[in-house]
Image (cartoon, rainbow, N blue to C red):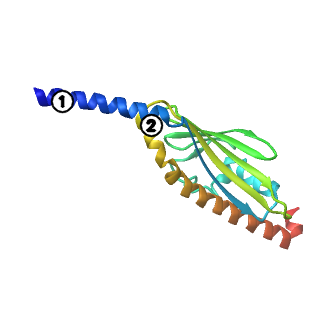
Amino acid sequence: MRVIKLALISIVALFFVMSFFSLMMPSTVIVSRAVDINAPADSIKMHISDLHQWVYWVKGMNSKSVNIQSSKEADLGRQKLSIQSVTDSSVVSFWTSASASVQVSTIRLIPAQQRNITIVQWQFVQKLHWYPWEKFGSFMNDKILGPMMEQNLQNLKLLSEHQTVNLEANPIEAQ
């Protein structure tokens, strides 16, 4: 009986200690990556503002579990992806999971000083609940999302730069 009582008290105390530390942690997590692309912003915007184009640069978007319903809506199995707004310099999308948590993704197009170079910055913002397991689990967001974002941005870079080279080599076909 003593052992059970000690175990219960220890579990409750551990829960309160973890809750205290999780309250000290930020409730917003941001993961961000960027790449320089040797292409004008307009040609890149075409690839990021239409979900049908995402199959060419976002790994997994051409999977059988992905159902692209329109240029702004897609069902990714357990998640739903919807593009909320498109401006000259950004594309904002919501990634909603079955547990109703929402991640806001923003892809920004930033013109660089050099001619035809655009900085593409992609960030995910996730609002966390006060739950200790959610906050401690968020430590892995950068390690999980970061490499995937880097690879996808490299794919976008190759796609955009290749398209720009083709358009410059064949200007008649571009019209």
Q: What residue occupies the far left of the structure in this picture? A: 1
Question: What amino acid is at disc 1?
Answer: Leu
Label 2 secondary element: helix
**For residue 78, above or below residue 111:** above
Q: In which quarter of the image is residue 76?
A: top right
On the rendered image, what quadrant is the C terminus found in? bottom right
Percent across and percent down for residue 132 are 42, 34
Q: What residue occupies the far bottom of the structure in this picture? A: 169
**For residue 151, above or below residue 3:** below
Question: What amino acid is at disc 2?
Answer: Glu
Label 1 secondary element: helix
Give the foreground label among 2 and 1.
Answer: 1
- Front residue of 59 and 63: 59
Seen at 22% across and 28% down, the residue is: 8
Percent across and percent down for residue 32 are 62, 50
Earlier-in-chain disc, 2 versus 1: 1
Classify residue 151 as left or right of residue 139.
right
Seen at 54% across and 58% down, the residue is: 147
Let me know if residue 72 appears in the view.
no
Classify residue 2 as left or right of residue 130.
left
Q: Residue 134 carries which label?
A: 2
Percent across and percent down for residue 4 are 15, 29
Percent across and percent down for residue 141 are 51, 47
What is the total number of numbered labels drawn onto the structure image? 2
**For residue 27, above or below residue 40:** above
Q: How crowded is mark 1: few (under 14 residues within 10 Å), some or many (20 or more)?
A: few
Please give the residue where the numbered disc 1 appears in the rendered image.
6
- Label 2 to label 1: alpha-carbon separation: 27 Å
**For residue 23, above or below residue 154:** above
Q: In which quarter of the image is residue 80?
A: top right
